[in-house]
Amino acid sequence: MRRPALLALGFLAIGLPPRLLLAFRGPPSGHPAVALPTRGPGSDGYRGSLPPPGFKVPEVSLRDYHGRLVRLRSLHGKVVLITFLDAACRTTCPIVAAAVGAGLRLLTARERAQVVPLAISVDPPADTPRRIRAFLARRHALGLDYLVGRTKEMRPIWKAFGVLSAVQTGSADLHSSDVRIFDRRGTWVSTLHAVVDLTAGNLAHDLRLAAKGRRRQ
């Protein structure tokens, strides 16, 4: 990955506003190596940034920290929330997990049943089941299902999502940590970032729009 792309993802991980990240985007390569938002909220009602067009949920199968197998493509028909966390992170990840937990609690029971909230590990060696549960519990985010695997298994998954992992940077506090919302068709429709636009209210709002089938404009 080119240095500008690494810089962009690094700044994204620490919450630099998406409009400033555009200056660090490298030339397109035909692969979503750096999946940054293209612009902010539009007239479609979503409060999160507009993602790259046509990005679908990758065909990924991982076990959660309880040992249960999760196949992302089998979640078609549900709204899927995906973020990228490191249980050893002390900067962005606690903010993200707390906001996701709070946002899910704003949904009614009927709305919550339509949403599958997932976190994908960006630091498998550090993300043990015990550490993950303690991290989620401290942030009141036990409703967030945390997926993890061996580092070798995770590398193609990080690439498919276009994220920078803590394994790659060597720092638990420097990695991609945006929150992505995929609609019932598996299309990425909204991106929320800590310190920029990720709040419990914004998250619940965009999840509801995705459940209603609202398309991006």
Image (tube, grey):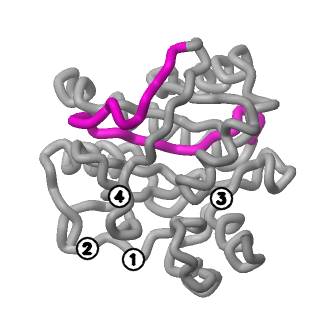
Count residues near mark 1 (Cα–Cα under 10 Å), then give few for <14, some for 14-19, many for 20+. Answer: some
Q: Amino acid at mark 2?
A: Gly
Q: Quadrant of residue 27?
A: bottom right
Q: Which type of secondary structure does the marked residue at label 2 adopt?
A: loop
Q: Position of residue 68 (x, y in %)?
A: 51, 14
In the figure, 147 relative to 30: above or below? above
* Extreme residue toward the right, this view: 170
Q: Amino acid at mark 4?
A: Ser
Bounds of the magenta span? 68-89
Q: CA distance from mark 3 to mark 2?
A: 23 Å
Q: CA distance from mark 2 to mark 4?
A: 11 Å
Is 122 situated left or right of 100 in this image? right
Residue at (32, 32) in percent of width and height: 75
The image quadrant where one finds the C terminus is bottom left
Query: Which residue has dot 4 on it?
Result: 190
Q: Is residue 55 left or right of residue 166?
A: left
CA gap, disc 1 and disc 3: 17 Å
What residue would you read off at disc 2?
A: 42
Q: Which residue is mark 3?
A: 13
Sequence-wise, the earlier of marks 2 and 4 is 2
Left or right: residue 18 compared with residue 156: left
The residue that label 1 is drawn on is: 39
